[in-house]
Image: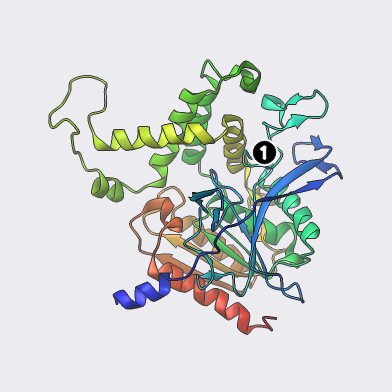
């Protein structure tokens, strides 16, 4: 069995990669009514676009990720792409067969136009004035990038969590431009509890004395304390109770209780470490906007809450994947998507993985999960010529 698992999880690296930027000077009207006169998107590509331009796969990122999906940078070999275990030669998404595109979303902090960018109207960073963006806005911007790359139709659009919401929205906004959609660890809309988690995280940031209404760049400070707490809150929701207990238990770092407010338990140390690390590389204004995009996503809202009607335009073939221990976006939420697709007689496969890792399971090495994704992409190749 181990040999089989090794085979499923094996594959090479795409190696050293280069981040690129595309500039768009045609204004983009956002869902909020605001307009960006121009914008840039940071992106990376892996593999080669075939002569028919039919083998492109768009990978959409989740909350704190970026366009850097696979490989490493030549000047920073430790900076490995966030889904490097999934994407590469011989991996489930095989870059020897597919042309893979990763993009940093609008409002991001990894190279695309966002709050840290210069507002052409003021000559200063946008800061708190950068408009709130939505999943629909991201998909519209990604379509511009597809045009720029000469991709009229994606063989597949895929993502996990917030990335899965984008994949789903692609099938609604541009049904004729998506052949397949891989929707992993998703939900058709956030529950009240999930919105509540996001709001507590936002309050931690906006009430930080260093926030300055989002214009902290001008003050030479970062709302680091709020961002740390926001990340700690989020991280708790990404892991299952079983994984937390298995990894950390109730181990006391000092052997006995300290009877103070320093770190006693291993889980406290872990959360503080994650919060500290996150606050050094992620922008607080971006965090606010991404969590709002999560909250606002609800394609059924325009159809009286009827998800089946919302997904009626979709023409793609779907693979929907959920994980049993994901209590943030439970399998029941994925099954809502499946039912709505079946109501429309769409081609959909559903896989529910018994995995202990919680919401983060979509990022983990799991032989069953990887085998299913590999087979799904393999079946795509059987549907038409690869070259």
Q: Which residue lies furthest to the front in this view?
A: 75
| Residue 260 falls in image quadrant | top left
Tally of numbered discs: 1
Q: In which quarter of the image is the N terminus?
A: bottom left
Mark yes or no: residue 232 visible: no
Is the residue 306 above or below the residue 276 in the image?
A: below
Front residue of 199 and 272: 272
Is the residue 384 above or below the residue 182 in the image?
A: below
Secondary structure beneath disc 1?
loop
- Please give the name of the residue rendered at 81% of the width and 43% of the height, measured from the top-left corner: 28
Q: Which residue lies furthest to the left in this view?
A: 256
Is the residue 292 above or below the residue 322 in the image?
A: above
Locate residue 201 relative to residue 49 in the image: left or right: left
Front residue of 303 and 148: 148
Locate residue 10 relative to residue 122 in the image: left or right: left
Residue of label 1? 107
Q: Which color mode does the image show?
A: rainbow
Locate residue 354 relative to residue 285 in the image: left or right: left
Mark 1, Cα crowd under 10 Å, few <14 / some 14-19 / many 20+, is: many
Is the residue 31 above or below the residue 72 in the image?
A: above
Estimate the x, y position of residue 332 in percent, counting from the top left: 46, 57
Estimate the x, y position of residue 245 in percent, counting from the top left: 25, 46
Mark yes or no: residue 24 visible: yes
Estimate the x, y position of residue 325 in percent, counting from the top left: 36, 55
Estimate the x, y position of residue 48 in percent, counting from the top left: 68, 69
| Residue 70 falls in image quadrant | bottom right
Q: Residue furthest right?
A: 26
Q: In which quarter of the image is the C terminus?
A: bottom right
| Residue 96 falls in image quadrant | bottom right
């Amino acid at each position: 069995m181990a040999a089989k698992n090794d085979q499923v999880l094996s594959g090479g690296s795409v190696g050293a990669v280069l981040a690129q930027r595309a500039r768009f000077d045609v204004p983009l009207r956002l869902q909020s009514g605001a307009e960006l006169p121009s914008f840039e998107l940071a992106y990376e590509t892996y593999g080669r676009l075939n002569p028919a331009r039919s083998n492109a796969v768009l990978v959409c990122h989740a909350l704190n990720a970026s366009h850097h999906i696979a490989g490493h940078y030549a000047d920073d070999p430790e900076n490995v792409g966030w889904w490097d275990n999934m994407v590469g030669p011989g991996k489930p998404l095989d870059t020897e067969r597919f042309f893979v595109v990763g993009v940093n979303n609008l409002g991001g902090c990894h190279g695309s136009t966002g709050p840290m960018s210069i507002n052409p109207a003021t000559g200063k960073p946008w800061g708190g004035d950068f408009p709130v963006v939505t999943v629909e806005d991201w998909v519209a911007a990604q379509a511009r990038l597809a045009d720029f790359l000469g991709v009229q139709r994606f063989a597949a659009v895929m993502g996990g969590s917030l990335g899965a919401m984008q994949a789903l929205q692609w099938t609604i906004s541009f049904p004729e431009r998506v052949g397949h959609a891989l929707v992993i660890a998703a939900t058709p809309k956030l529950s009240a509890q999930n919105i509540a988690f996001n709001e507590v995280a936002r309050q931690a940031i906006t009430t930080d004395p260093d926030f300055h209404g989002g214009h902290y760049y001008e003050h030479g400070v970062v709302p680091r304390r709020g961002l740390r707490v926001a990340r700690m809150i989020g991280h708790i929701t990404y892991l299952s109770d079983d994984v937390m207990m298995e990894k950390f238990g109730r181990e006391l770092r000092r052997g006995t209780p300290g009877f103070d407010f320093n770190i006693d338990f291993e889980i406290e140390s872990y959360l503080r470490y994650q919060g500290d690390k996150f606050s050094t590389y992620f922008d607080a204004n971006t965090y606010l906007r991404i969590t709002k995009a999560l909250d606002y996503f609800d394609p059924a809202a325009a159809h009286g809450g009827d998800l089946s009607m919302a997904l009626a335009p979709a023409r793609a073939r779907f693979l929907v994947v959920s994980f049993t221990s994901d209590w943030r976006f439970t399998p029941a939420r994925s099954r809502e998507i499946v039912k709505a697709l079946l109501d429309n007689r769409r081609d959909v496969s559903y896989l529910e993985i018994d995995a202990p890792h919680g919401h983060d399971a979509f990022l983990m090495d799991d032989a069953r999960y990887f085998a299913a994704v590999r087979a799904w992409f393999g079946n795509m190749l059987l549907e038409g010529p690869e070259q």
